[in-house]
């Protein structure tokens, strides 16, 4: 298979690697889409390796998010049969694969893969895991909403957009700080009001406080 590998020098190259085979508890995903996040760029630049606990001299695969179709599963995996569309998140120091998600095939533990609902494009699904889980973990650290208010800065960004939607679903009264052009998006996501991050006299827009169905 072909995979993008980050070299010791901090550059990257497309390399040919053996097709991976899932071990116990794992599935192999035939990649359809792999997102590019700031975390990936940090790994390319080098300092992100230290944050992720990856040795500076180690060659690693690029990519953390993936969506695709299960094309091979270990015998002990029963809930993700071959042909299941899934999205998953992996790690730059995962011991089970020499490649990241920017590869033709991606190995992940079956517990780390989630079926993609009907009607969601796999390229879109590939953008979900890292950003949504980051937002979810941040909200978990804040504890229950209990009628509390939450200001989300960068509210229309990769993590911020999920933070707004997940917080609204959890019962927070959410205010989003973003550009005026993103106000409608944030209102639909569940923000009760938006503040213009660029300033100006039209900086506040109030919403319904309810997420609207697509």
Image: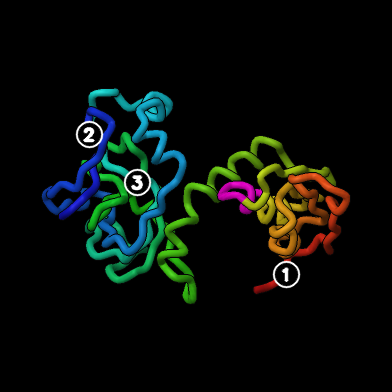
Q: What secondary structure is marked by label 3?
A: loop
**Residue drawn where x is 12% and y is 49% of the image:** 16
Rendered image: mark on residue 63: 3
Q: Nearer the viewer, mark 2 or mark 1?
A: 2
- In the picture, the quarter occupied by the C terminus is bottom right
Q: What secondary structure is marked by label 2?
A: loop
* Pointer 2 residue: 7
* Pointer 1 residue: 212
In terms of depth relative to the viewer, which is nearer, 2 or 12? Answer: 12
Q: CA distance from mark 2 to mark 1?
A: 45 Å
In terms of depth relative to the viewer, which is nearer, 25 or 17? Answer: 17
Q: As drawn, is 91 to the left or to the right of 1?
A: right
Residue 90 at x, y percent in the picture: 37, 45
**Residue drawn where x is 30% and y is 38% of the image:** 94
Mark 2 packing: few (<14 Cα in 10 Å), some, or many (20+)? some
In terms of depth relative to the viewer, which is nearer, 200 or 187? Answer: 200
Q: Nearer the viewer, mark 2 or mark 3?
A: 2
Q: CA distance from mark 2 to mark 3?
A: 14 Å
- Which comes before the other along the chain, label 2 or label 3? 2
Q: What secondary structure is marked by label 1?
A: loop
């Amino acid at each position: 298979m072909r995979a993008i590998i980050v070299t010791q020098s901090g550059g990257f190259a497309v390399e040919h690697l053996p097709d991976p085979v899932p071990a116990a508890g794992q599935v192999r995903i035939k990649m359809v889409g792999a997102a590019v996040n700031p975390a990936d760029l940090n790994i390319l630049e080098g300092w992100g390796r230290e944050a992720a606990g990856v040795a500076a001299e180690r060659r690693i695969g690029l990519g953390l998010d993936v969506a695709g179709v299960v094309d091979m599963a270990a015998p002990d995996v029963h809930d993700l049969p071959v042909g299941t569309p899934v999205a998953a998140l992996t790690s730059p120091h995962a011991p089970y694969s020499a490649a990241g998600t920017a590869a033709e095939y991606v190995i992940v533990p079956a517990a780390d893969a989630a079926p993609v609902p009907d009607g969601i494009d796999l390229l879109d699904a590939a953008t979900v895991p890292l950003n949504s889980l980051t937002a979810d973990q941040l909200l978990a650290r804040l504890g229950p909403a209990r009628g509390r208010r939450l200001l989300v800065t960068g509210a229309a960004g990769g993590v911020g957009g999920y933070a707004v939607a997940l917080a609204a679903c959890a019962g927070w009264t959410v205010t989003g700080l973003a550009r005026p052009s993103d106000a409608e998006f944030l209102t639909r996501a569940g923000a009760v009001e938006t503040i213009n991050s660029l300033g100006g006299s039209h900086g506040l827009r109030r919403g319904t406080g309810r997420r609207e169905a697509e």
